[in-house]
């Protein structure tokens, strides 16, 4: 087991997100309410969760909306952390452990 030098944000869609998603999901893409979180790795040592959200809310919202519908025209406008909080719930932590012995692969998205 290895400790990874990252903290994390665990992002869960809110009821408002699912309302938008169920209206804007393409007909050929089966969508259901799934409370499985998305995990975003962030700097390991952070002191204020709100500051982290302020820094990353735009990237996270883009990623989450794009998963449902890649057409940006359908995405809600999220211009600040308060609007982000209407669509997502989040939890944070600063301990990330890798239980596997193989290396981590990553790619730019």
Image (spheres, rainbow, N blue to C red):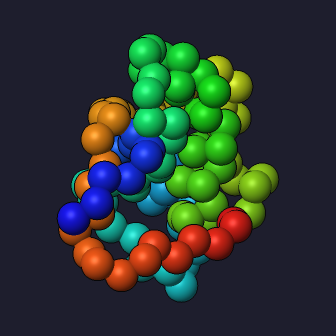
Q: Using the image, determine if residue 23 lies above or below residue 8.
A: below
Residue at coordinates 57% horizontally, 60% vertically from top-left? Answer: 24
Q: Using the image, determine if residue 45 lies above or below residue 40.
A: above
Front residue of this view, candidates 49 and 68: 49
User: Residue 64: which quarter of the image?
Assistant: bottom right
20 to the left or right of 90: right
- Can residue 58 be seen here? The reply is yes
Residue at coordinates 57% horizontally, 71% vertically from top-left? Answer: 106
Front residue of this view, candidates 26 and 40: 40
- Can residue 34 be seen here? The reply is no
Q: Using the image, determine if residue 99 lies above or below residue 59.
A: below
Residue 92, percent across and down?
Answer: 33, 33
User: What is the quadrant of the N terminus in the image?
Assistant: bottom left
Total label count?
0
Residue 86, percent across and down?
Answer: 45, 27
Residue 11, percent across and down?
Answer: 39, 44
61 to the left or right of 30: right
Residue 107, percent across and down?
Answer: 64, 72
Q: Using the image, determine if residue 85 lies above or below residue 109.
A: above
Residue at coordinates 28% horizontally, 60% vertically from top-left? Answer: 2
2 to the left or right of 70: left
52 to the left or right of 96: right
User: What is the quadrant of the C terminus in the image?
Assistant: bottom right
């Amino acid at each position: 087991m290895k400790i990874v030098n990252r903290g994390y944000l665990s992002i869960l869609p809110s009821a408002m997100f699912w309302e938008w998603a169920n209206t804007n999901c393409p007909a050929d893409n089966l969508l259901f309410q799934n409370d499985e979180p998305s995990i975003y790795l962030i700097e390991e040592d952070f002191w204020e969760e709100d500051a982290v959200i302020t820094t990353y809310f735009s990237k996270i919202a883009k990623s989450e909306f794009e998963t449902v519908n890649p057409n940006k025209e359908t995405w809600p406008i999220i211009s600040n952390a308060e609007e982000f909080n209407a669509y997502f719930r989040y939890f944070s932590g600063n301990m990330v452990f890798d239980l596997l012995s193989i290396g981590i692969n990553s790619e730019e998205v």
